[in-house]
Image (cartoon, rainbow, N blue to C red):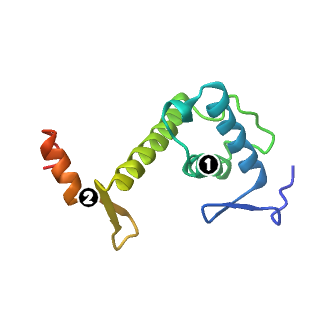
Amino acid sequence: MVLNLTKIKKIMGKTYQPFIIKLSKRIIEVLDNDVNFFKEEEITDITFAEKIICEMLTEKFIKNELSTDDDLIGIFTKTEFGNILTQIKTKSIVDSLIKLGYLNYFEDENGEEKFFLTTEGKEFAKKNNITAYE
């Protein structure tokens, strides 16, 4: 199959091929409808999930490990899929802590996000005898 490079779509500012987005949406549907992943993890915004899945699919396509004709079966190894789910859950937890005011972040000179406990976060940790942050 020849890719039409004029048919591209964006998710969170990144451009992806339509077949990548289509596969990503099918994976999201399975996670949402078949295994209730988002409901069980209390994730209401799936934008990050779409992004991380599209990135992993694109990486596989670039490495020639994915074809435009591939189906869902066997796209990711068990470990790869576990890592994707872990990243989605972690992002959801971090976003929740930021919304609660317990956590904040900044971008360093390399563009990497660096997270830290806010004053409220430190007070909450101290009040609940959580010492791992020290």
Amino acid type, callout 1 = Glu
> Which residue was labeled with disc 1?
50
Q: Position of residue 123 (x, y in %)?
A: 16, 51
> Which residue was labeled with disc 2?
116
Residue at image coords 33%, 63%: 105
Q: Is residue 131 visible?
A: no
Q: Is residue 89 visible?
A: yes
The image quadrant that residue 108 belongs to is bottom left
Give the SS element for disc 2. Answer: strand
Q: Position of residue 14 (x, y in %)?
A: 63, 63
The image quadrant that residue 17 belongs to is bottom right
User: Eyeballing the image, is 40 above or below 129?
Assistant: above
Give the CA distance from mark 2 to mark 1. Answer: 26 Å
User: Eyeballing the image, is 84 above or below 112?
Assistant: above
Disc 1 crowd, CA 10 A, few/some/many (<14, 14-19, 20+): some
Give the SS element for disc 1. Answer: helix
Q: Position of residue 107 (x, y in %)?
A: 36, 69
